[in-house]
Amino acid sequence: MTKTSANTAYSPIGVFDSGYGGLTVLKEIVKTLPQYDYLYLGDNARAPYGSRSFETVYEYTLECVMHLFDKGCELVIVACNTASAKALRTIQQKDLPNIDPSKRVLGVIRPTTEIVGNYSKTGHVGLFATQGTVNSLSYLIEIGKFFPGLKVFQEACPMWVPLIENNEIDNPGADYFVQKHIRHLFSQSEHIDTIILGCTHYPILQKKIEQFLPKPVTILSQGSIVANGLQDYLQRHPDMERRCSKGGTMHFLTTDSPENFDRHASLFYSKPVSSEHLELL
Ligand code: DGL
């Protein structure tokens, strides 16, 4: 995992999530930008992040980003809303200038909030996300910058990630929790016509969400939004683009058992995956 060719340093684009959810983003990024090398890191040993404190999510995220830098990444995508909400700004503003000001860490909230207003006719948008993302108010704050007139209604879904991570989505328990949170969201406004899946795990539940929605609404899931955002970023930052190696390779790291990771990852990535264990410091 050190070189892509005799002369080119291996400098993959790092993609990080608390567990499997970031694979739904990686899948779309690779479809859009297949030429680059990618290194995925899932912190499965410590997932879920959604109900953890700001301090803990920040500490875990920084540690994982540092591991990706150590493996040669110049650019890291935090493909986790909870980590983007709770850790990204501090890493960008406080840590990166000390670690290496030429490296970059990008998140998944900004690209979503930049476009959401283009989809809603009623001006009422719903957000499903983890408790941590909802508490951070990051979506409200960011959307307010781009679409100040938009009303955003949030619903935290603390059971959705555990149901997904434990492969329980086809069971009646999953139906119960999906229906419950849809009901809560629409009780805040019946005019919601656009919903953001503000957690990278949630695309796995999209069909079930659609099945229980009270009316047709536009569902925005982040994979293709983040992929288009990254493409645009690399076009606008040719220096960074040049530093990302282009071997078309894919490597997966997990902080937990690679056997477990490989068994579950294909649900998210839609292809077989072969991972290696990463020892946390
Ligand atoms: N996939 C992560 C997100 O986008 C959250 C999962 C977790 O709770 O760890 O928020």
Image (tube, rainbow, N blue to C red):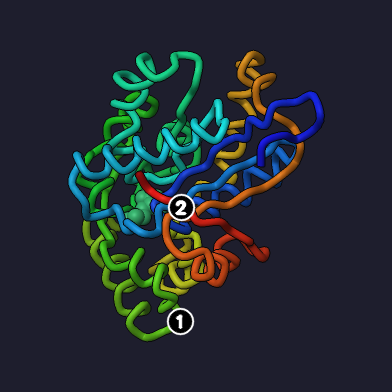
Residue 231 drawn at (x, y percent):
64, 30
Residue 148 versus residue 249 in the image, above or below: above
Q: Secondary structure at mark 2?
A: strand
Q: Residue 60 falls in which quadrant of the image?
A: top left
Residue at mark 1 to residue at mark 2: CA–CA distance? 23 Å
Numbered tag placed on residue 170 in the rendering: 1
Q: Considering depth in this image, is 50 or 130 the residue closer to the camera?
A: 50
Residue 272 drawn at (x, y percent):
66, 65
Residue 36 versus residue 79 in the image, above or below: above
What amino acid is labelled 1 in the image?
A: Asp
* Left or right: 62 as drawn, with respect to 210: left
Badge 2 crowding class, 10 Å Cα cut-off, few under 14, some 14 to 19, many 20 or more, is: many
Q: Earlier in the sequence, mark 1 or mark 2?
A: 2
Give the residue at mark 2.
42
Residue at figure coordinates x 36%, y 86% from the top left: 172
Numbered tag placed on residue 150 in the rendering: none
Q: Residue furthest right?
A: 6
Across the whole image, how many numbered discs are drawn on residues? Answer: 2
Q: Considering depth in this image, is 204 or 44 the residue closer to the camera?
A: 44
Residue at mark 1: C-beta within 8 A of ligand 1 = no
* Left or right: 6 as drawn, with respect to 3: right
